Image: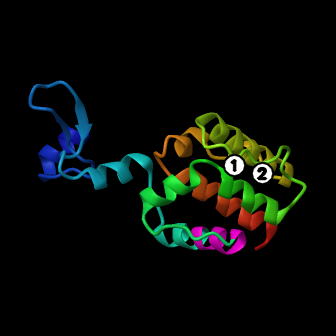
């Protein structure tokens, strides 16, 4: 239908399907416009809400967070600041102490600890983000949505 619509109107509401010159891989949109493609594939983001939530995290934890997206992913991916956030909001909600070791296993342990604490506070499992998004430093969208629900839950 989209192809027929494009033929009829001269344009499409969807990005074009393109491939590498050798035909090895397909992607949506031109290779030059990766920023559009990523946001289109990951869903809509609200920069204002994202900024507001990250400021709230910074205020509660007394930690300075970077302003760029990659820096934020780098700082939050080990889960230490997120566990600190939960400790400040509800000191008894963390099931285990925060793992301070700089290893992938420690980051995974902290992330699972954080998610369990959110469940202890009262968030449902379907309101939580997928930890791999943050552990692999791919996306903040799920984390921001979860933190927004947490903020609403505690009434901050």
Q: Which residues are magenta?
A: 54-61
Q: Is residue 17 above or below residue 78?
A: above
Q: Quadrant of residue 65?
A: bottom right
Crowding at mark 1 (Cα within 10 Å: few <14, some 14-19, many 20+): some
For this orientation, the residue located farthest to the right is: 92
Q: What secondary structure predominates along the stretch shown in magenta?
A: helix
Q: Which residue is mark 2?
A: 118
Looking at this view, is 130 or 59 the one in front? 59
- Is 140 contained in the magenta span? no
The answer to whether marks 1 and 2 mark residues whose Cβ atoms lie closer than 8 Å is yes
Q: Is residue 119 above or below residue 51?
A: above
Q: Give the mark, 1 or 2, whose residue is nearer the N terminus.
A: 2
For this orientation, the residue located farthest to the left is: 21
Image position, residue 47 (x, y; %):
46, 68
Color encoding of the figure: rainbow
- Residue found 69% across the figure and 49% down from its top: 127
Looking at this view, is 16 or 147 the one in front? 147
Q: Which mark is residue 127?
A: 1
Q: Is residue 139 above or below residue 86?
A: above
Would you say residue 140 is visible in this rendering?
A: no
Q: How many marks?
A: 2
Distance, label 1 to label 2, CA atoms, is 10 Å
């Amino acid at each position: 239908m989209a192809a027929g619509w494009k033929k009829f109107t001269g344009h499409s509401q969807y990005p074009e399907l393109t491939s590498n010159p050798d035909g090895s891989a397909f992607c949506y949109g031109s290779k030059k416009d990766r920023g559009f493609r990523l946001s289109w594939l990951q869903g809509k983001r609200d920069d204002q809400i994202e900024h507001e939530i990250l400021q709230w995290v910074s205020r509660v934890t007394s930690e300075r967070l970077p302003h760029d997206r990659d820096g934020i992913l780098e700082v939050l991916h080990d889960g230490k600041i997120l566990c600190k956030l939960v400790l400040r909001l509800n000191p008894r909600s963390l099931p285990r102490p925060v793992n301070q070791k700089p290893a992938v296993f420690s980051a995974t342990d902290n992330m699972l600890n954080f998610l369990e604490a959110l469940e202890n506070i009262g968030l449902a499992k379907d309101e939580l983000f997928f930890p791999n998004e943050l552990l692999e430093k791919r996306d903040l969208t799920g984390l921001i949505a979860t933190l927004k629900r947490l903020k609403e839950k505690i009434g901050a």
